[in-house]
Image (cartoon, helix red, strand yellow):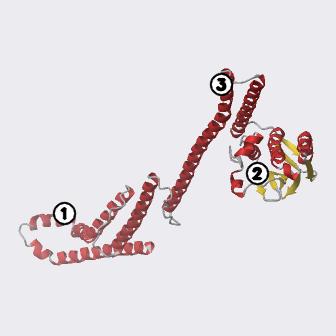
């Protein structure tokens, strides 16, 4: 279409050129026919006769023809030049970024069609830029759910898509920052609460001792023993909190290949006294030759928590089943006890810091609410994953790591 219009303009320019030549030729003929009459005018005769006698009639006719051609060509193309100048001025405004400018032409020829096409283009461009600008203002106000319409096949459409993607990423970053702030505040609250409780008890019993408000040596030792146990619980909480913080801040890992069947056999041996004391037995079902890459010392820490929990809360089931098996490209290590189930409402939060399924039970067993959070951090920082399932028959904690082939 554009090529056709350009061809039409060129054809019109050629027609104007030929028309100008024809007009110039016709005027020359008329002037030649009127030359006798012109020469009879006294004011014109002497200089014109001198020019013709000295230069010749042909050069005079040639010069006169060129002058007539230029004058007729200028007059016939003057309107086109003015229209083209308006188009050029409009294009300069558009180039300068003034997309609301219009090219005002009254003609309906090809130049007018070109101007109308440019006007439509700038109107569409200006409207789309207003949509993008409106979207940016909304995003600047914090309305990150604002989506700028994306027009495919357009570079401005690519700009709009980039803005939308930036908005989504910015929104996600803000949400993560708010979550991190909330997590920090929750951590401070949890730590403050869990430190204050045993510390208050310790200070209370020490105050009784300091003020000699005990009856005899037996009661004194009783108070001292309680204060000592509370201090031990406080130390355990501080140690667990330090361990959790250290893991999440990126502790150095000694990653090596570990044969999981052999690893679990050695770990279970360490828990034989605890199992016998609880009247429980531990059975291991392990596929041989399953190897993962992990930090053995940290993995011991994580699995000690899982086995200790299985003994602590699964004592009524009298046994623990540990299984090591291949699942696709992963090695699964599961710990199953048959004690009281974890309530379904608590399962989504079981790995949260300071979360206790039963506060009273945790106090009796000395739990800090950080053991499973530490276990989860240790597993995930080494590229593994952990999950839990619980029903009336059994509770199973399962970890999975990529298998070394």
Q: Nearer the viewer, residue 9 or 314?
A: 314
Q: Which of 9 and 193 is in front in this view?
A: 193
Q: Which of 149 and 219 is in front in this view?
A: 219
Q: Which of marks 1 and 3 is in front?
A: 3
Secondary structure at badge 1 equals helix
Instruction: Tell me which corner region of the image, top left, top right, bottom left or bottom right, holds residue 300.
Output: top right
- Give the residue number, with chain letter if any, for mark 2: 385
Q: Which mark is residue 54?
A: 1
Disc 2 and disc 1: Cα gap in Å?
A: 110 Å
Q: On the picture, is 356 further left or further right than 125?
A: right
- Give the residue number, with chain letter if any, for mark 3: 207
Q: Residue 391 location in percent, x, y?
A: 78, 59
Secondary structure at badge 3 equals helix
Residue at horizontal 5 percent and vertical 68 percent from the top: 42
Residue at horizontal 41 percent and vertical 67 percent from the top: 124
Disc 2 and disc 3: Cα gap in Å?
A: 47 Å
Q: Which of marks 2 and 1 is in front?
A: 2
């Amino acid at each position: 279409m554009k090529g056709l219009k350009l061809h039409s303009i060129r054809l019109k320019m050629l027609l104007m050129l030929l028309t100008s030549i024809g007009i110039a030729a016709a005027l020359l003929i008329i002037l030649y026919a009127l030359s006798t009459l012109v020469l009879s005018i006294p004011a014109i005769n002497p200089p014109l006769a001198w020019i013709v006698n000295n230069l010749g009639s042909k050069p005079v006719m040639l010069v006169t023809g060129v002058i007539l051609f230029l004058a007729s060509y200028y007059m016939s193309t003057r309107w086109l030049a003015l229209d083209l100048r308006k188009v050029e001025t409009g294009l300069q405004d558009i180039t300068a970024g003034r997309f609301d400018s219009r090219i005002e032409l009254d003609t309906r020829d090809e130049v007018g069609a070109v101007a109308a096409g440019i006007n439509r283009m700038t109107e569409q461009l200006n409207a789309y830029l207003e949509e993008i600008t409106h979207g940016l203002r909304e995003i600047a106000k914090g309305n990150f759910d604002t989506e700028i319409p994306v027009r495919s096949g357009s570079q401005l459409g690519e700009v709009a898509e980039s803005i939308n993607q930036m908005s989504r990423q910015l929104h996600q970053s803000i949400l993560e920052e708010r979550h991190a702030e909330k997590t920090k505040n929750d951590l401070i609250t949890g730590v403050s609460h869990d430190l204050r409780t045993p510390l208050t008890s310790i200070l209370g019993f020490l105050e009784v001792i300091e003020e000699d408000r005990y009856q005899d040596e037996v009661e004194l030792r009783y108070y001292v023993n309680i204060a000592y146990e509370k201090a031990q619980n406080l130390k355990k909480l501080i140690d667990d909190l330090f361990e959790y913080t250290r893991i999440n801040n990126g502790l150095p890992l000694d990653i090596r290949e570990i044969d999981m069947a052999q690893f679990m056999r050695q770990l279970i041996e360490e828990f034989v006294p605890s199992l016998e004391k609880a009247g429980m037995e531990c059975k291991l079902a392990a596929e041989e030759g399953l190897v993962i890459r992990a930090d053995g010392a940290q993995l011991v820490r994580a699995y000690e928590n899982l086995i200790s929990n299985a003994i602590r809360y699964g004592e009524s089931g009298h046994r623990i089943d540990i299984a090591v098996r291949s699942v696709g490209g992963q090695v699964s290590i599961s710990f199953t006890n048959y004690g009281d189930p974890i309530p379904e409402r608590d399962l989504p939060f079981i790995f949260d810091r300071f979360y206790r399924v039963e506060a009273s039970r945790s106090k009796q067993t000395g739990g800090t609410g950080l053991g499973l959070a530490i276990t989860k951090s240790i597993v995930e920082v080494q590229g593994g994953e952990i999950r839990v399932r619980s029903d009336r028959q059994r509770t199973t904690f399962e970890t999975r790591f990529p298998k070394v082939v």
